[in-house]
Amino acid sequence: MMDRLSFRLVVAALALGVLMSTGAYAQQPLKIGLILPMTGPFASTGRQVTAAVKLYIAEHGDVVAGRKIEVLLRDDTNAPETTKRFAQELVTNDHAEILTGFGLTPLAFAAAPIATAAKVPMIVMSAGTLVIPEKSPYILRTSFTLPQQSAPIAAWATKHGINKVFTLVTDYAPGIDAETTFNNVFKANGGQIVGEARVPAQNPDYAPFIQRAKDAKPDALFVFVPSGEGAAVMKQFAERGLAKAGIKLIGPGDVTDDDILDSMGDAAIGTITSHFYSAAHPSAENKAYVAAIEKANPGMRPNFMSVGGWDGMELIYEVLKKTNGSTDGDKFIAAAKGLSWVSPRGKVTIDPRTRDIIQDVYMREVKRVSGHLYNVEFDQVASVAPDGK
Ligand code: DHB
């Protein structure tokens, strides 16, 4: 005869089995570790991404596939060792089942080994160096890559009378990606590079580099600087009279970042960039998005970092619907491959081969519209691969 205690244990085990098999275990909250620079020089990226994540949850509800979503926000202050420590603590102590955010490339690099060791899905919402998804089989990306954003402007330049270019990039991985891609495509189209500068990532002073660019007398200055730095470049471009000397400003759209574009003044007008997101993108989805972000955060205009956060949440929600709430690393990645949806930026697809994002890239010109500066789209390259090819 079974004693009372054993009987109780068997009942408990059976009950647990029923719970597990019906998926009711999934009633446990699903914790998402969101790691971003919320303070320091790249705080605008943290602010933009968290506003998008909050809006996504407010509009779609905080329960998906029977699981209550809980976001645990951590401020890494743009220090890679802090990103790594938070990623480790979130997974081990807080039992976070997904890691996301990653405002800059060194921060994404720092967290990748944790995702690999824990087999936890890691969704990169912001950083843009091409090789990031190769750093862990559990990485997916909803932001962009610099080769993807730099190839279209290189192809456009030679077709529009720009034959000599000086390149200026921030001296770290995404800057090198931008420079390399621009050089390759521009030269293949018959263009000539008349000088190049790599500006230190820490406390940059753009003045001497922009003076060197002016002295080289190019048709255009190609610039990549990370989000938040564009205004400082624009100030030097104006003060040193490059526009008056007939030099055009071109690049991927980081330099005319919507977060700060309107504060740059008339010096920014006429800047031509190729990029995946403009707050002025004229779709119904984007108009609703810009209005909703502004309503929830008075005075805020969403920038390209914002849509990386929005689409990161869309990816998480759509994958969870497919996996019935499971975050098992291998199942999650398999379910993400090939997913496609319409974002405020246009159509996006998770490339099944690279786990990276395929998206349309737009040609834009800075113009004043109803008194405010915007990147106004005038052409489009459809479905650009992560490597820009
Ligand atoms: C990265 C950061 C940025 O702010 C940006 O505009 C592009 C790339 C990065 O570190 O990957």
Image (spheres, rainbow, N blue to C red):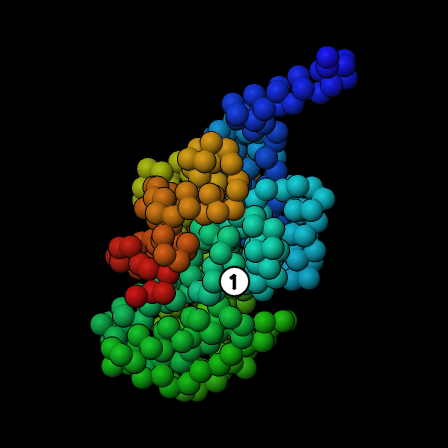
- State the image coordinates of residue 13 (x, y, percent, origin top left): 65, 23
Quadrant including the N terminus:
top right
- State the image coordinates of residue 120 (x, y, percent, origin top left): 56, 48
- State the image coordinates of residue 128 (x, y, percent, origin top left): 47, 61
- Is the residue 269 above or below the residue 30 in the image? below
Q: Residue at x 33, y 60 (%)?
A: 385
Q: Is residue 189 visible?
A: yes
- Is the residue 219 above or below the residue 259 in the image? below
- State the image coordinates of residue 369 (x, y, percent, origin top left): 36, 50
In which image quadrant can residue 353 be found? bottom left
Front in this rendered view, residue 37 or 283 = 37
Q: Residue at x 35, y 41 (%)?
A: 341
Quadrant including the C terminus:
bottom left
**In this figure, which residue is indicated by the disc labeled 1?**
135
Label 1 crowding class (10 Å Cα cut-off): few <14, some 14-19, many 20+? some
Q: For numbered disc 1, what is the local secondary structure?
A: helix
Asked if ligand 1 lies within 8 A of label 1, the reply is no
- Image check: 158 left or right of 20? left
Q: Residue at x 36, y 52 (%)?
A: 352
Identity of the residue furthest to the front in this view: 1
Front in this rendered view, residue 149 or 234 = 149
Front in this rendered view, residue 13 or 252 = 13
| Dot 1 amino acid type | Lys
Q: Residue at x 72, y 44 (%)?
A: 93
Identity of the residue furthest to the left in this view: 159
Q: Is residue 298 visible?
A: no
